[in-house]
Amino acid sequence: MHDGAPGQNLYGFDVVDFWELGFEMFRDRDRFGARFVRADVLADDGKLEEFEGWLDVVHIAMVSN
């Protein structure tokens, strides 16, 4: 961990799974620890219901509809 939250406390949501490319680029698969979920944050399809009410910080960027 550098400055910020430990990787195991982070969640990433995206409609595409570029996280595999990120692991290859940064070579940190064995120590990053974040959980990635393939989901559309704008969709009302229930995929994100398990996270409702307990995420402390949400950052959303580069969203189009």
Image (spheres, helix red, strand yellow):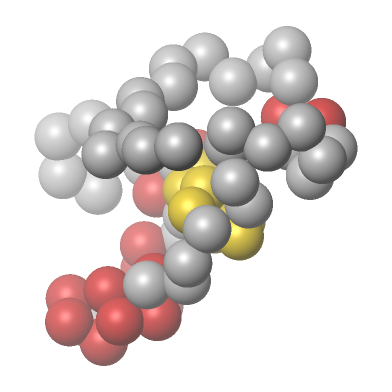
Number of numbered callouts drawn? 0
* Residue drawn where x is 47% and y is 67% of the image: 16
- Position of residue 19 relative to residue 64, above or below, is below
Q: Where residue 9 appears, x then y in whole percent?
A: 50, 39
Q: Is residue 50 visible?
A: no
Left or right: 49 as drawn, with respect to 25:
right
Q: Position of residue 11 (x, y in %)?
A: 51, 44
* Viewer-proximal residue among 31 and 21: 21
The reply to whether residue 14 is in sight is yes
- Above or below residue 31? Residue 52 is above
Q: Quadrant of the C terminus?
A: top left
Please indicate whether residue 13 sits to the left or right of residue 1 in the image.
right
Q: Residue drawn at (36%, 29%), measured in percent from left and top?
A: 60
Residue closest to the far bottom: 24
* The image quarter in which residue 52 lies: top right
Q: Position of residue 33 (x, y in %)?
A: 46, 60
Q: Position of residue 45 (x, y in %)?
A: 82, 40
Q: Residue at x 26, y 87 (%)?
A: 24
Frontmost residue, 65 versus 43? 65
Q: In the drawing, does residue 47 fall left or right of residue 29?
A: right
Residue 44 against residue 19 in the figure, above or below: above
Q: Is residue 2 left or right of residue 24?
A: left
Name the one closer to the observer, 14 or 23: 14
